Image: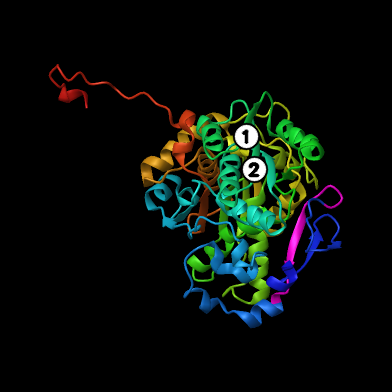
Amino acid sequence: MSIAESSFVSHLEGAIDGTHLEPNVVQTLHDGRPIWVRYDLDAVSKSVSRSELGGRPANLWRYKELLPAYDESRIVSFGEGMSPLLKSPRLGASLGVDDLWIKDESQLPTGSFKSRGMALAVTMANHFGITSVALPTAGNAGGAAAAYAARAGMSCYVFMPEDTPIINQYEAKAYGAKAYRVNGLINDCGRIVNEGKETMGWFDLSTLKEPYRIEGKKTMGLELAEQFDWELPDAIFYPTGGGTGLIGMWKAFQELSQLGWLDSPKMPRMFSVQSSGCAPIVEAFEKEEKHAVPFSNAHSIASGIRVPAAVGDFMILDAVRKSGGAALRVDEDQIAEWMHLGMSREGISICPETGACIGAVEKCIADGTISAEDRVVIFNTGAAQKYAEAIRCDIPLLDKDRPIDWAAF
């Protein structure tokens, strides 16, 4: 069964030049750049209304008309639930924001937002009969790919920098992937994946090197609109490495607008957050460039945003600029502090990438970029417990055989 027969996909489109591409064959990049999935939104509008969604299971697949996977027999899933949108008043008070929310992706099946992208990417690989996949990873994507590949019965190869968080290393291996560490960065791992395609026969699941991870990530935006009763927030702060999540959400908002499902034409300002240790998108934004220059000596405790070069750089920058937002860098040395602030104020399992976003909100309140009255959403893209190195701290040891010194508490 073809995609065209089983979904509302009209065509694929080269993001760099708008060229229409065939949706019913395996596609990777066009002219070296990513590909959009486009839908017949008139047909979607006639087939389903937003009010009908409420009667469906609260999972990613409730938006099936806006996803390429419509043949349920080919779907690869762990029942990806709608992630909670949590009001965060104590953290908001600490930052000076009256209406702060955290969308908590840490509760997805593999502990991060990567579950969304891999659900669609592996489902579509399954649709096309692909049996072996490979990818470079800075952390959570490797474990997610390994899990979904195992669910589909595919072989999976994962290549990661040697200092990738230890839990990410272990989970990829535990899910059955052939996992390898590389003495370099994610772009070095990506080169290995590319070089091995012909010899090993694997399909490259790298960020934005196939069209469907964006479609999974865009469900974050679809959910957010529904959770806010079809009125989008004033500002969204999103940690940016490869940028699929930010790009996907902006795409979701445009599709919802064209469908007439939004109660207000207002679009959120999109803030792409990076660390001072790796900020290629920020540098391109500040220089008003279309593309980013690879960042030298990239480093960050927030491994997911330690991406020195993104193939979808122009897509990230386009979304940020069109929304009236900005690309922001925060001090690498303060990320752990912001992470702990968020965890201690709200009890949410916040990852270091989200810690960077907390710092960005603090910065934007201080310089007036956003106001205290704005409705602000921070995306928590992963669970803190997957970053043992980032949450490590000293805990005093009590001697069971000695009297307790209560004054020391």
Residue to which mark 1 is pinned: 178
**218 within the magenta span:** no
Q: Secondary structure at mark 1?
A: strand
Which of the 4 quarters of the picture holds residue 45? bottom right
Look at the image and give the residue range highlighted in magenta: 30-41
Task: Check disc 2 and report the residue beneath it.
Answer: 155
| 11 vs 271, nearest the viewer | 11
Q: Are marks 2 and 1 in contact (CB under 8 Å)?
A: yes
Which circle marks residue 392 in the picture?
A: none
Is the residue marked by circle 2 packed among few (<14), some (14-19), or many (20+) residues within 10 Å? some
Instruction: State the residue lying farthest toward the left.
Output: 403
Residue 83 in the image: state x and y as whole percent: 47, 57
In the rendered image, which quarter is residue 175 located in?
Answer: top right
State the CA–CA distance, disc 2 to disc 1. Answer: 8 Å
Question: Going by the image, does 129 lie left or right of 14?
Answer: left
Residue 263 placement (x, y as % from top left): 56, 75
